[in-house]
Image (tube, grey):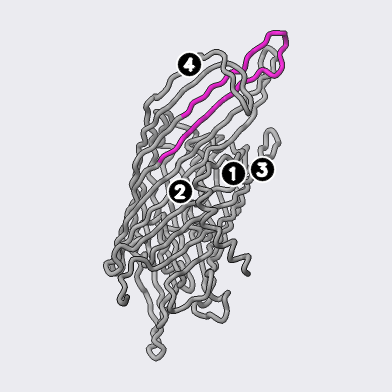
Amino acid sequence: MLFAKKIIRLIPFLGFVCFLTPTQAQINSPFSRYGLGNEVLNNQNVNSQAMGGFSSAYTPSMNSSFGQSININNPASYGYIYMTTFDLGISLTNNTLKSATPVASYTSTYLVPNYIAIGIPINKAKKIGFAFGLRPLTQINYSLNEFKVISSGDTVVNNYIGQGGLNQAFFGVGKAWKYVSLGFNTGYNFGRKKIENIKTFQFNTDSTYFYQSLSSTNTLFGGAFLHLGLLSEFPIYTIKRPKLNERTEYSISIGATATLDQTMTGQQDILRNTGSYTSTAESPLDTVISSINNAGKIILPALYTGGIALHKKEVGARGGYDQWVLGIEYSSRSWKDKYLFYGQQDALSNSWMVRVGAQYCPNAYEYENYWSTVVYRLGFYTGKDYINIDHNGLLVSAFTTGMSLPIRKYRSYDYQFSLLNLALQFGQRGTGVNNYKEGFFQFSVGYSLSDVWFNKRKYD
């Protein structure tokens, strides 16, 4: 038990290391070549990940009675923040890529950060709170070889290399009223897209020697964004037990978010030269093209999300908690119609996703049985990915599960709460109509520490 506690205490440190250390894991996926790369799987708090990514109508009462997590994907929830909360998540992902023609299979495993966020109540009486943090949105990281026999009989090897991705630094404010809350996130999206093609003549039909050629395009980009959120929760049926000072309350929550169209500015360097290139050294010989600091724009389409959830809430003298929750959500984004990278479109589709999630907590106040205080979650999502590598569309489906574990027993005189949030998801990208299919498995660990700060002392 003592060893487990030491491991849990290391989670915040591991999270910081993941964010401060550049991720160079090879994801071996041709999908990350397109658009701005592979979208990070459910890059919201781990609680939502375990519910199939359901987040737009996810209310703070769903967290549990022992602390809270920050719902990054709907800033309207910030108005309900009642304790200063430090929240982070990291994920271990395993991908297996299969190709039908030619028959091949590739596997990769990598550790990446999901998010780091801090939420602070500004005014508890007026229900105003804010949050800020950092999270990755997409990943580009691959190295693929292509062998070609040209008309002269020579064998040419093309090595395609890509690195980069899109990240987001954000802050937001939320304000809650009795049944409705509003909020917004803003900040800066920034990233890099570097694509290289190293061409090598591996076999020649004559004695002519050819140097390798390098074609490289490196683009740095960034720009401000605006993300709006609406959240409403209201009771529909109540069963009162006056003698026990308790009640059972059935309620509905409705949420909607909109990330507006965004235009990012970029600086692009283009290089074309010949020479000798290995994994450890580059020896350029002759430069054909060298053009630096080329200005351009990257246009990202708007993202719209809407969801609804049904809750059963148990309220008593010690507080309240959601015993069970059922929710569904839909989102869409017009990548094919609106995305542009330096004026060029890409092999993309208009994406959509349906998410279904459920959670259950047997009894948050049954302290004699620890597992009754745990929140259990299940979920499923299916939809169409924004990448369209073979113009047949790319369907995605996955199952999810997880739980929230209170780190220690509740104490009425304590104002510090810690939760260990776990999520597991497994699914597939691509179907029988696609030449490439990718199975994925992801295990996520989230850690949220909530505490009461900035209270004015009544006694010295």
Q: Residue beneath label 2, please?
A: 135
The disc, 3 or 1, on the residue closer to the chain's N-terminal end is: 3
Toward which corner of the image does residue 413 lie, by quadrant? bottom left
Q: Foreground: 421 or 50? A: 421
Mark closer to the observer (2, 1): 2
Q: Secondary structure at mark 4?
A: strand
Q: Foreground: 298 or 113? A: 113
Residue type, label 3: Thr
Residue 434 visible here: no
The disc, 4 or 1, on the residue closer to the chain's N-terminal end is: 4
Q: Foreground: 408 or 430? A: 408
As measured in the structure, the alpha-carbon distance from the residue carrying label 3 to the one carrying label 4 is 36 Å
Residue 50 visible here: yes
Q: Which residues are magenta?
A: 190-218
Place of residue 7 in the rendered image (x, y in percent of width and height, measured from the top left): 59, 61
Place of residue 206 in the rendered image (x, y in percent of width and height, measured from the top left): 72, 8
Q: Residue beneath label 1, please?
A: 430
Toward which corner of the image does residue 222 lie, by quadrant? top left
What is the crowding at mark 4: few (fewer than 14 residues within 10 Å), some, or many (at least 20)? Answer: few
The disc, 2 or 4, on the residue closer to the chain's N-terminal end is: 2
Q: Foreground: 245 or 209? A: 209
Q: Is residue 203 magenta?
A: yes
Mark closer to the observer (4, 1): 4
* Mark number displayed over residue 107: 3
Q: Residue beneath label 4, please?
A: 289
Q: Are marks 2 and 4 in contact (CB under 8 Å)?
A: no
The disc, 2 or 1, on the residue closer to the chain's N-terminal end is: 2
What is the crowding at mark 1: few (fewer than 14 residues within 10 Å), some, or many (at least 20)? Answer: many
Q: Secondary structure at mark 2?
A: strand
